[in-house]
Image: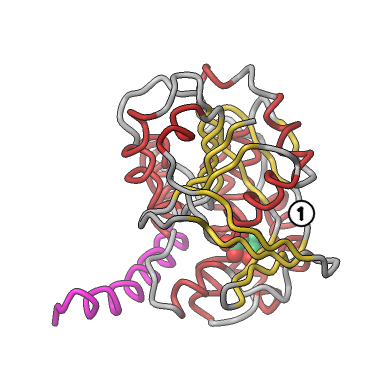
Amino acid sequence: MKITILGCGALGQLWLSRLYQQGNDVQGWLRVPQPFCAVNVIEPDGTSFNHNLPTNDPEHLAQSELLLVTLKAWQVSGAVTALLPQLRPSCAILLLHNGMGTQDELPPHNQPILQGTTTHAARHDGNTIIHVANGVTHIGPVTSQATHLSHLAEVLHQALPDVAWHNHIASASWRKLAVNCVINPLTALYGCHNGDLQRYPEQIATLCREVASVMEREGHHTSGDDLMSYVMQVIQLTADNISSMLQDIRAQRHTEIDYITGYLLRRGRSHGVPLPENTRLFELIKRKENEYERVGVGLP
Ligand code: KPL
């Protein structure tokens, strides 16, 4: 299959290497074009992949059947909007990022859009990508044009298992959002590993109750207790992780808070559901972000 991967960070390079090795015709798409993308991945079993893969070929893009987007949430609408006019109408766009709401920021279009979440963990070590842990990727359609595209799950599964197709991906996306609403801001504020959050059960229960109240209004059956046990399970499974938000804060990068807690707050507001604890965490993260972003643009 002809595929373009937009965003060649750790996860993007992992997909590039696996889809290429499975015989797909893949290229990367970089914000700052370079002649090729040097992909160097070390797998959990110690095997490595080292290859220069093509990038930014407009003809390849125009013929692609899948645009796999592995950018940070806040980069998605700008980057995808710029590529929309170059895609064939049937090219599916799969958005794989933390948080929700990016597709609402795209201009009117008819591309089939899919959304996904993944628990594969990959990180940079210099110019090398370490595939830290295998996981599961859940994907599904968010526009009617994408409902018949379940065969994409099979293509992706052959390359980087497991991939599961969901006709109703929103429930899985909301459960992942709940995980990110708890783990990401709390680890960023306490400066701790995911596993250390086991010390804050009451705060986690409050956050989960708030997320559950919005999910119920959105038509997804759940409860505070149900989300709490799911979040606690993820905290244990990823105990040694440094969350992506803590990594962003430490590197003084823009975080995905607007698409994680920010998305929850927007949905809560539209249903008239008060979310005091999530609002408090949102404001604290924005304050942290503003501290270094103001300095970055030379503001006092
Ligand atoms: O998605 C994650 C992240 O760090 O962004 C979790 C699941 C919290 C794992 O660290």
Magenta-tinted stretch = 276-300
Q: Amino acid at mark 1?
A: Gly
Instruction: Tell me where residue 222 appears, x and y as whole percent.
Output: 67, 41
Which secondary structure lies at badge 1? Answer: loop
Task: Judge left or right: residue 238 versus residue 256.
Answer: right
Q: Quadrant of ligand 1?
A: bottom right
- The vertical placement of 281 against 178, above or below, is below
Front one among 211 and 3:
3
- The vertical placement of 154 against 199, above or below, is above
Residue under label 1: 135
Q: Quadrant of residue 106?
A: top left
Quarter of the image with the N terminus is top right
Q: Is residue 206 visible?
A: no
- The vertical placement of 59 against 224, above or below, is above
145 within the magenta span? no
Instruction: Tell me where residue 173 appears, x and y as whole percent.
Output: 60, 42
